[in-house]
Image (tube, helix red, strand yellow):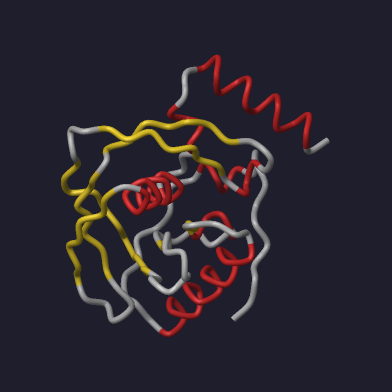
Amino acid sequence: MSVRKILSWPDKRLRTKCEEVTEVSDETRAIWDDMIETMDAMPGVGLGAPQIGVMQRLAVVDTSEARDKRIRLANPEIIDASAIMNVHEEASPCLSGVSAKVSRPRGVRVRYLDETGSIIERDFVGLDATSVQHQIDHLDGKMYFDRLSKVKRDMLIKRARKMNG
């Protein structure tokens, strides 16, 4: 396992929709292991594969205090979402130093392949739901700030550029 380098905005790979995973292989599991190592080093509560330059529909999430609830997802897709919205402060190591309040469904049902290649349907609520949705956005070539108004998005990017030279 190793910590991978995080891509920086505006790397075009962060705007590219990722390829479906055809099978969960040892290589897939090794990528997930590196992603978990990288997520913990950030530290963060989730990571999408394109953030480390791997253009596959892979994500990891762990919002637990103890960092012991690793969820590995391949080809995650939202199949149902709560009408109730939650607002969380979101950020990304791809655009470091800034964050913004983003509104997303409080709960989502997600279908994905797990580390054994089995199809799983699972409900995510609260921060887990926010993180899973954030990672799925990355897999679709979107960033959290795309969910902001143009004015807020432009201000956020400008502030990040100032901070990061």
Q: Position of residue 65 (x, y in %)?
A: 46, 64
Name the outermost residue toward the front: 65
Vertical position of residue 155 compared to residue 54: above or below:
above
Q: Residue at x 23, y 47 (%)?
A: 108
Vertical position of residue 113 compared to residue 20: above or below:
below
| Residue 59 seen from this side | no
Q: Is residue 138 left or right of residue 106?
A: right
Q: Residue at x 21, y 59 (%)?
A: 111
Q: Residue at x 20, y 61 (%)?
A: 122
* Closer to us: 11 or 8: 8
| Residue 68 seen from this side | yes
Quadrant where the image shows the N terminus: bottom right
Vertical position of residue 114 compared to residue 157: above or below:
below
Q: Position of residue 60 (x, y in %)?
A: 43, 64
Quadrant where the image shows the C terminus: top right
Examine the image and state in which quarter residue 117 appears.
Answer: bottom left
Q: Position of residue 56 (x, y in %)?
A: 44, 61
Name the outermost residue toward the right: 165
Q: Position of residue 81 (x, y in %)?
A: 19, 42
